[in-house]
Amino acid sequence: MAFAFVFPGQGSQAVGMGRDLADAFPAARHVFQEVDDALSQKLSQLMWEGPQEELTLTANTQPALMAHSLAVVRALEAEGGFRLADRVALVAGHSLGEYSALTAAGAFDVATAARLLRLRGEAMQKATPPGTGAMAALLGAEIDQARAICAKAAPNPETGQAEVVEAANDNGGGQVVISGAKAAVERAIEIAKADGVKRAMLLPVSAPFHCALMAPAADAMAEALAKAELRAPVVPVVANVTAAKASDPVEIRDLLVKQVTGTVRWRECVAAMAAMGCDTFVEIGAGKVLTGLMKRNAPEATALAIGTPADVEAFLKTL
């Protein structure tokens, strides 16, 4: 059994997340306290009590999801003597989850990751004026079709000028998310429907992530990451933008900057991990989004999620 640990991204958050872990495990409780201290905010209280609208603000969501994932990792270590370096072959995370993956593998400490993700959320939010960008899910489309739809949708019919509309997430299983200028994304939705894509719909997000419009956020992250302490991870990370493994801190910094504007190549990341021998994918943290995708991207592999104390205990019994 060769494990890959995978870490969820935005959309997996929910009020109440992680509270049972904090109640059950002192090591998990310590992670939430570390994040609260690093951000000078009671983020844990917001995670556990809401309100949902505030938790969904990207500057809160990003460190919150990392905190939940790291609370699970620390609980596995403290309760079962589980050592990532000994038991896990590869780590990967979806978008912000890449920071969780790197933190679990010792590249960042928890406080540094929390501060970087707070900045990342704020920078992504500020990169475009509210209401000018959008994202849409194309269900029943593969990546090449989605890129062709974006190319058709880019020219503004009134001005002839090309507007940004790009593939943001290639999630696999016929699920591609596109991102860009609102009008261009809306044109892409109409083109997708005309092209026979099963479903094309706007997503309830606050900014157009993972496209060229995020360039100001990439600049902000380049500056922050240049100053942040980043060690070589004890387990290689499979990076979003290359779908290849990385261990060198200089390369990882560069990949994290490129990730802000680049496509999350999740389908290819899973295929790469499977090709490297991983047969058991364990989603660490909130929700089961990646576990669901795994069934489509690597149907022959085992996929499971660990997000609660019962999950932690059940997993440790299998080892």
Image (tube, rainbow, N blue to C red):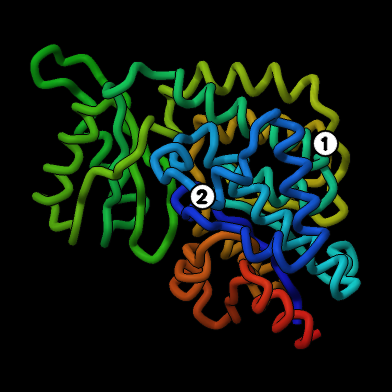
The reply to whether discs 1 and 2 touch (Cβ–Cβ < 8 Å) is no
> Circle 2 — which element?
helix
Q: Residues within 10 Å of mark 2 (few under 14, many from 20)?
A: some
Looking at the picture, how far across and down is residue 104, in whole percent?
Answer: 77, 53
Looking at the picture, how far across and down is residue 259, in whole percent?
Answer: 57, 35
Quadrant assignment, res 119: top right
Q: Quadrant of the C terminus?
A: bottom right
Q: Which residue is mark 1?
A: 249
Which one is in front, 273 or 294? Answer: 294
Tell me: residue 298, above or below residue 133.
below
Can you tell which mark lies on residue 61? Answer: none
The residue at 43%/43% (across/down) is 51
Which one is in front, 21 or 273? Answer: 21
> Circle 1 — which element?
helix
Q: Which residue is mark 2?
A: 49
Measure how far apart labels 1 and 2 are at the Cα level: 37 Å
Q: Quadrant of the N terminus?
A: bottom right
The residue at 82%/43% (across/down) is 107
Tell me: residue 69, above or below residue 56.
below
